[in-house]
Structures are given as structure tokens and as C-alpha cells.
Image (cartoon, rainbow, N blue to C red):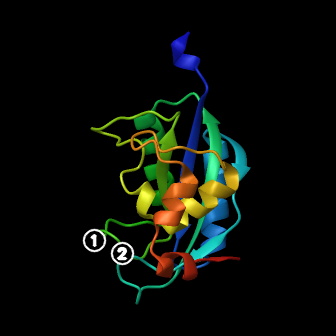
Amino acid sequence: MLESQVNTVYLGIGSNLGNKINFIEKAKSKLIENNIKILQSSSYYESLSWPDIKNPKFINIVLKINTILKPLKLLKICKNIEKELGRKKMPKNSPRECDIDILDYNSKKATGDVNLPHPRIHLRNFVLLPLFELNKDWVHPISKHHIKTLISSLPNRDIRSIKLI
């Protein structure tokens, strides 16, 4: 009975190579093909590549989904979708066609095969702003900081350098 529990999850999807919006939309379609129900999708946000701003800019969204999948199975599906869309094994933070991260899974805390919530969620303008668009009351499962507090803690350059598209 617990196996079929529906979980509310936030996913971040980003791309900074090729037709970025097309890659994001293809990733959404592939999630649906894997019986993942998309409840909400944020607007598109364009941000500087991190940590090397010389790389192409990113476009990012956040999705609110429902799934019966456990975190590790969901992560494996996300990694397979990235590969299907052309992502290769490259050094960390290299430009990529598609990146899908589990940001928050039922407000659970976990470490090991899957770290929940995403360990750098509170530092990323390209996650916090679209997440705020979907859930103005989101609270970090570990720090217990409200999303408005997290956004206001970002450096001014991170707020200025992201734009809604």
C-alpha cells in the first residue's frame, strides 16, 4: 500500500546548449512518458552559467510533479532522460543539453544515493526564483528557512543577473 503513495516533488530542469527551450520541453515530455504527472511548470528563467560565466547562459524551469516513484528510481529516470537528450559525461559544471535535478521530495531529508533536498538549492537564483513562482510558502526541509528568506539572502548580483523570459 505504501508503495503506491503519491509524492509531491520539485524538479529543476536546465539547459545551456543548443535549442535550450526545446531540450527543456523534450525533457518534460519524457517525464510524462515515464508516468510522472506534471502539476505545474514555472516560467523560463535565463541566468549566467555557474561557476564559469564565460559558458553559455542557462535557461531553467522548476516543475511540481506527482509520482509514486521512490527518490532513487526517479533520479535514475532523470539521468536516463538527460542521456537521451544528448548529455555526455563531462567535467562538473560543463555546458549541457539537459540537466534535471530533484530539488525537493515530499520535504524529506536524505543523504546517500540521493541527497534531499538538493544540497545547493538555497544558493541558486535559478532554482529559488522559479520555485517561489510555484510555491510562495516553500520551506527548506533542513534549515527551516522560508523561501523568501533564502531569496533575500542571495547576493544582489544573483538577483540582478537572472531574468524572466
State the image coordinates of residue 23 (x, y, percent, origin top left): 60, 67
Residue placed under numbered mark 2 in the picture = 94
Q: Residues within 10 Å of mark 1 (few under 14, many from 20)?
A: few
Q: Residues within 10 Å of mark 2 (few under 14, many from 20)?
A: some
Looking at the figure, which quarter contains the C terminus? Answer: bottom right
For the point 44% across and 43% down, the residue is: 75
- Amino acid, disc 2: Ser
For the point 46% across and 68% down, the residue is: 154
Distance between the Cα atoms at labels 2 and 1? 6 Å
Label 1 element class: loop
Q: Which mark is residue 91?
A: 1
Q: Quarter of the image holding residue 65? A: top right
Residue 30 in sight here:
yes
Q: Quarter of the image holding residue 24? A: bottom right
- Look at the picture and state if 165 lies above or below 142: below
State the image coordinates of residue 90 (x, y, percent, origin top left): 31, 70
